[in-house]
Structure formats: C-alpha cells, structure tokens
Image (cartoon, rainbow, N blue to C red):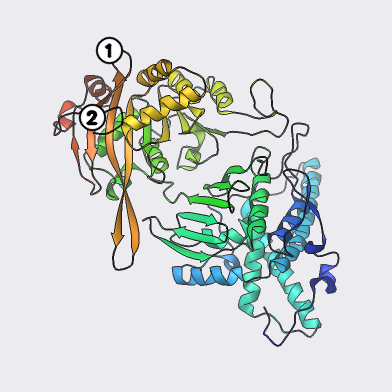
Amino acid sequence: MTDEHTTEPRLADMAMFSGPLPSERTVADPVVDQPVASDRPGGMGALAAAARAHTPAVQDSRSAQSPPPLPTLQDTPVPAQVAPPADQETALDEVDKMGELDQVLVGMLKQKASEVLTSRQRARDERVSAARRQNDPLPVFTQEDREVEGADIAQKTVDSYVEEIKNLGRALPSINEQQRLVKALFDELFRLGPLQPLIELPDVENILINGDEVQIMRPDGSTYQVKSPFGGDQELIDWLQNMASRSGGGGRVFAPTSPGLRLNLPGGIRLSALAWTTNAPSVAIRLHRHKDIDLPRLTSLGVMDPRLEPLLAGMVSSDISIVISGPMGSGKTTLLRALVAALPIETRIGVAETERELFLEELAGRAPFVVSSEVIEGGGERNPVTGQREGSFSLDDQLYEYVRQQLERVIVGEVAGKEIIALFKAMQMAKGALTTTHADTARGAINRLVTCAMEVGVTHEYAERQVAEHVDLIVQLDTKWTYDEATGERRSHRFIKSVDWVESDSDDARPKLTHVYEGGPDGDGLFGTFPQPLRERLAGVGITSGQIPANQLTTRQPTEEGQR
C-alpha cells in the first residue's frame, strides 16, 4: 500500500493497534477446541483470531446458546462506498487488487470495527429496554440500518488508520487503496470476507477451488482462472471453519475428524468442501442465479419444447410425485423451483433439506405458505443406537413433524443416500412430493433410488415396490457440451432429455416406465404415450385429450442398464 521507497510502520507500534499481532497469538479452533496457530503471519489466521474474539464457538448439547447467524445478502441495499463494480473487466481487476491487501492489517482493522459495532449494539439494546419499560418503543433498527452504520464505521476505522500513518510521517495509501480497505472491512463484517469479490463477479455461477487454484465457471459452462483470495491452504481452512461455526442450527463441524463440509452460505450460496483427505482443500461453491424462475422462462432458454410447458404445469398441479433426475450441474434445482412456481400461491409446501438451498419462501407471495427446515447436525456425543449426535435434527425428524403441519406438497431437497426413506415417507403423507437425484437416465434414477434404499437396510424387492408405488413421474435432465475452436472454450446447454411415467408392473410389482417425451438440446422434442392414469390426472386440472400431442414415438421400455 506504499511505494517502494517507504516502509510502513509495524501495526503494533501504532496506538490503535496496541496488543499482540495475530501471528504472536495462539487461538483455539472453534470446532475441535484444540490450540492451533496460523501457518503464516496474517491472512485468514488474523481474520480467524479476530472473528473468534467476537463469534461464539460451536455449541454442544450442553449449551443452549447458538452463534449469531451471518446477515442475509438478499435484497439488502449496499452502501455506495462498498458497492461491487458493475462490469466484468473492472470486477476482475478489483479481484486482483483486493487480493493484494495486507490481510494482517484487514484483520486488525476488523477487530477494531467489530468492537465499535458491538459497543453500539449494546448501547442500542439498553435504550430499547429502557424505552420498553416506559411503554415508548423505539423504531425498529433494521439489517439495512445496521449495514449502513457498519459501512460508516468501516470508513471511520480506515480514516483513523490513515491519520496515524500520516502522524508518523509515512507515505499514505491512495484513495483507491483506502476504499478497498473499507470494502474489505465491510465484507468481513457483513458478507463473505475475502471470497466476496469473487461472488460479485457478474458472470459467475460456480467457484471451484483446489488449493491455490481457483476456477470461475460461467452459466454456459465455460471457465477462466483467477488469483486465489486466500494466502495458502491454512487460510482457506480457517475461513471454512469460521463459516461452519457460524452456520445456522448451532454450527457445523469441519475438522480432521469430520473432513467433509456442506453449507448454505448467506444469499442462497451452496458450498461443499473437503480437506485433510485430499491433497489440497477442495471447495465447490454454487450460486443459484435463477431463483425466481418459472416454466415459461425455461422454455425461452431452450430447456424444453414449448408444447411440454403446459403439460408439466398440469402434471405438478395434479398431485403426482415427481423425481427430477440428471447429472451434476444439469439444472435440477432450477427446474424444481420452476415446477413449484406452477402451483397456486396458496399451496402449503413443506421443504426438508440437509442444507437449505431452495428458498421457496423467498418467492413472491409464498412466504405464508412455505414451511422450510434443514438438518441440525448437533454437537454432542453420538447416540449408540442411532449413530446421530445428541441435539441433532434429521430429515426423518423433519418429516415426522411435518405430519401435523397440514401440508399439500412435501419436497425433499435431494436424494443421495439415506434421504430416500424420508422421501418414501413424504410420498406417503402428502398429495404430491418432489425431489431431485443424480442419474443419467430415468431407469438410472430408479436404480439410484433403489440402491440408496438398500444402503439403509431394506431389501431390493421392498425398495422397488416403494418406488413403483410412490414415484409417478421422472423428469430427466441432461447437458450438451460444445467446443468453440476459436477460443478453445467449451460451453454447456441444459435441456429436458425425457419424461417417463412410472407405474407398478402387474406381474412382479417392479417399476415400469412409459416414455412420454423425448427432448433434444435445441429445445424441441417428440411425444410418446400418455398412459390413461396420467391422462386422468391431467383432466383433473383442466387439460383435455385435445391438448395432449399425438404419439410421435414408439414407446420403448428402457433396459436395466438405462439405455433406450
């Protein structure tokens, strides 16, 4: 932050930074509660030290206190001095420049700003309590108010630092450098810290981190590399542990004894991380850009034949249970949201997820009618019978409580393992259920569900019977990849590959598939057979036989391997 002919003073020599530097401290890990030290001075080690001074560690079952949640990112106006750049080129330039900031300095400034925020919050709480005692309540201090105040505190904290630099006769940071410090402070206090500049890139859909390597994936599947905002593996792990400890429901564990982490970050951002078992920390972050999506919008994006759109809307409205299947990144969550958007606003929906990802309650008008819950991992000893941590709240627990919630639809966010039992229960208790799973074909989706059920102890025959009895429709998604020879980039296009009706075979109760629709990557498709039970369901929501396209396919039964 200074030119090559000047030397910035040590932070410890400045009045506002009295006390030991982060590199001179040993801090307690908020998850495993063992002393750890940063692997190098500053960076996320400093951030973690400052954060831990103000953020409670993960609470076990012996304590009812939970760490404060991170503020939400959604629909909160950003103060002008910390607003992200609007265009891609400027944003990428800012990513590089923000990465050059001295993280020791940022950590110390954050500690000072946090102390001011905490002091003001305490004083405000006292004023509110006093006003209540006099039956004269003060106006509500909103999150937006708090962030505007926080931006002001960040600015004044940086101003104080600059003033001390000036008094010491040192070269001052430029105005742009000062504003980057203000933004870094604001991001630490209210956003996602050093990751925030990457989140704000205009074209980002996925952030893929493998140690020091960071790839940005656009919605079309093309990628480019950026400089890592973390100064090494330990800084990245510190940041992940800080995010885990501040997660809802009392925090989540991320440690050598629990090396996998799945989180929903503020703003509906999905994070999956691995460390200690991998050669370097591996993180995949997904930003859901299409939250407020519907079937017409998907049609305009070439996801399906326009003739399929009203039929899907009728299918989801006719109380049938739907499984959305597809490979990773094929748009399963987006399609699920679009199907929900086709339901009447007043439809009472229960959402059970391991980590919140759908956020249906944020869709216009649906908040009064959506009950959304996620798994709580718990922080105590494991139950010797169930294997669950004390204080945990599982998908089964969620579904048990939903029995008396008067729900019309139940959604189980994703089936990748033991969630299958929760799905079966959901399909038994509600008029219609929806879920997603990973598979390449409709038959593969059935095999996936059956395998997941067998992994939790049921027989193959029972699992197949449950799928045949409770799954009505499988919507299969796929991704077509193309290569641009001029740029060397590859791009993707998501589309509905097939729609299959599921029913029980009369001979052995195994799931039988009838091919209803076959789609292509150009947004067109061919229609097959609409079985009589499906026609009856569609008729119940006002879709007549005349609105169902004629059979353009000879319906072929998929083989056991899932090939048509």
> In x, y percent, where is residue 523?
24, 47
Q: Is residue 519 left or right of residue 229?
A: left
> Mark 2 and mark 1: span between their CA atoms?
18 Å
Disc 1 element: loop
Q: Is residue 285 left or right of residue 331?
A: right
Q: Which residue is mark 1?
A: 506
- Hey, what amino acid is under mark 1? Ser
Q: Is residue 407 visible?
A: no
> In x, y percent, where is residue 22?
78, 62
> In x, y percent, where is residue 126?
81, 48
Q: Is residue 491 above or below residue 322?
A: below
478 or 179, nearer to the observer: 478
445 or 137, nearer to the observer: 445
| Quarter in which the N terminus is drawn | bottom right
Q: Residues within 10 Å of mark 2 (few under 14, many from 20)?
A: many
Q: Which residue is mark 2?
A: 515
- Hey, what amino acid is under mark 2? His
> In x, y percent, where is residue 328?
41, 44
Question: Residue at left 68%, top 50%?
Answer: 242
